[in-house]
């Protein structure tokens, strides 16, 4: 059961990242072909940084 839940979370994360990538390709950032996400948790607060790339080079990003 734990393995199935883990697999479902990975699929959900992949789907969410793919949606972000497709969304950015249709917006103002051209030639976006990758997305990198850093999620941080220090026990009290969380942080999220999203970097969009083209040919391995950063072309945009956002964070929360």
Image: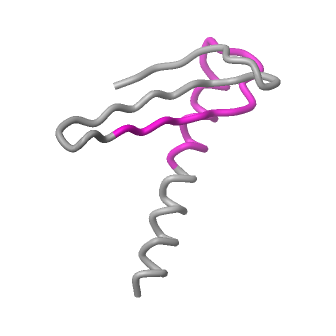
Residue 31 painted magenta: yes
| Residue 1 falls left or right of residue 11 | left
Q: Residue at x 60, y 34 (%)?
A: 36
What percent of the width, then of the height, locates residue 8? 48, 70
Q: Is residue 13 magenta?
A: no
Residue 37 versus residue 16: which sits nearer the camera? Answer: 37
Looking at the image, which residue sits at the far left?
Answer: 44
**Res. 20 image quadrant:** top right
The quarter of the rendered structure image containing the N terminus is: bottom left
The span shown in magenta is 16-40
Instruction: Give above or below for 28 relative to 14.
Output: above
Q: Quadrant of the C terminus?
A: top left
Q: How is the image coloured?
A: one colour
Q: Residue at x 54, y 62 (%)?
A: 11
11 over 25 or under it: above or below? below
> In the displayed structure, would residue 1 be above or below residue 45?
below
What residue is at 72 percent from the left and 24 percent from the top?
32
Q: Report the label total.
A: 0
Q: Position of residue 19 (x, y in %)?
A: 56, 41
- Would you identify the image quadrant in which residue 34 lies? top right
When asked about the image quadrant of residue 53, the answer is top right
Q: Residue at the spot x=67%, y=17% of the render?
A: 58
């Amino acid at each position: 059961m734990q393995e199935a839940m883990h697999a479902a979370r990975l699929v959900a994360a992949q789907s969410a990242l793919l949606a972000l990538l497709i969304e950015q390709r249709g917006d103002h950032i051209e030639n976006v072909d990758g997305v990198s996400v850093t999620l941080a948790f220090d026990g009290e607060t969380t942080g999220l940084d999203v970097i969009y790339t083209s040919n391995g080079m950063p072309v945009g990003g956002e964070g929360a």
